[in-house]
Amino acid sequence: MRFVHGRRRGTSLAEIERVYRTRFDEYHRVAAAVLDDPDRARDAVQEAFAAAVRKRGSFRGEGPLEAWIWRAVVNTALNQRRGGSPELLGPGRNGDSPDHRPDDDRAEELRGTLRLLPERQRLALFLRYYADLDYATIGAVLGISEGTVAATLHTAHSALRRRLEEVRL
Amino acid sequence: VNDFDPALVVELDRLAPPSATPLDWSDVLARAGRRRTSMGVPVVVAVFAAVAVLATPALGIRSRVGDLLGLHGGPRPGFVAALTPVAGSGSGSLVAAPVRPFTPVGSQRTVGFSRSLAVTIRFSGLSGPATTGLLRVTPPRGSAGSGYVVRLCGPCRSGATIQIQRRGLFLALLAGRGTAVIATAAHPTGELQGRLLPTRTMPRTPGG
């Protein structure tokens, strides 16, 4: 995925709107994964973009504009999660459903495993799989180096694969 | 470089499936504007209050709120006079300050002041012992009154502190209507004299 870099100091309303209109689904999907609630996720994304509009003069252009907004979205979603449901991808969305299927058990296992992962690993996974971000951008969003992103994802992959193998057996 | 795990893709898709959420850019702009308004008003009020309380001393104004809060812990107004010879010789000074200021418990700062003034007179080089010390207060400009005299000491000793209290004296001194006079036997109408001037630097309060 290629990103357009913003100006060196500040960014325009039009640029933020362009990101909003072209990337909204990805922002929303990651926020939904963090909050486990599409409605709250939409609210988080709207708030994050509103914050970006307000603070667009402080964008320093040291990285992609998308990454700068990603950071706002992730932080807003995390703040909303801390102010609401304490669980990340908490159980119960499908488990109590009347049309319970075997696949739901695997989903619940995966949810449980994700919940046990450290927050950085969860966020790296969400940004990688739901937003298709490269390591450099994930690092910019989470404030870590590309190498740390690779190591973080490797650790998360190992834990999830192990769990999925156990479930399949 | 970024290797996906196909199995994880399937499982993670199941957890947070893509959804068609309608875009609403006008809502973003409305939220941005709403927050600025709601945050702006308290900030402006807070800044105004801080300036009103803290900056007024710098402008030469004492705010009542600051006084009550003890924020103007700096010097209190007092009075000083340089005593110069009008007859004979010698020189001296007079310092007057409010006494018995209220000091809140646990604070080193004084708040408020009483109507009593502690007056300290110092002099030297007189033609003889100081027989009398007076504070002559003239009437307000344009007033038909004749003013009055407050006796400070007699005989007087250099360095002595006298407490005086009289209704309206503080305001009269603030208006610059007070003059100190030190008389000697050789000059009974006054050998040293000086006008009391208000000062924002409170002189040391002797015995206060």
Image (cartoon, rainbow, N blue to C red):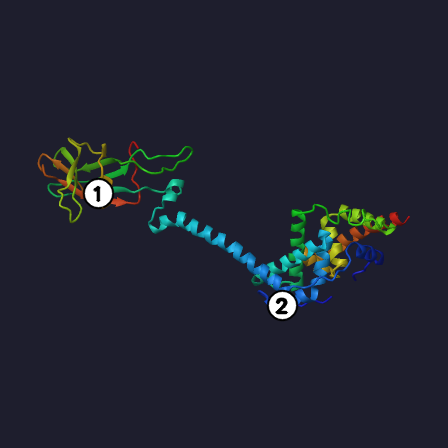
Q: Residue furthest right?
A: A169
Label 1: how many residues lie within 10 Å, few (<14), some (14-19) or many (20+)? some
Q: CA distance from mark 2 to mark 1?
A: 69 Å
Q: Is residue A50 left or right of residue B144?
A: right
Asked if residue A153 is positioned above or below residue B181 in the image, the reply reads below
- The residue located at (12%, 43%) in the rendering is B86
Q: Which amino acid, by three-letter code, is at mark 2?
A: Glu
Residue B3 point in image, percent of width and height: 81, 60
Q: Chain of mark 2?
A: A
Secondary structure type for disc 2:
helix
Residue A129 placement (x, y as % from top left)? 77, 58
User: Disc 1 residue type?
Assistant: Ala
Secondary structure at badge 1 equals helix
Rendered position, B192 above or below A94: above
Along the line of sight, which residue is nearer the eye, B5 or A151? B5
Q: Is residue A2 visible?
A: yes
Relative vertical location of residue B37 with respect to residue B201 in this rendering, above or below: below
Residue B127, given in percent of the width and then of the height, sits at 12, 37
Residue A41: mark in rendering: none
> Disc 2 designates what residue?
A15
Q: Which mark is residue B172?
A: 1
Q: Quadrant of the N terminus of chain A?
A: bottom right
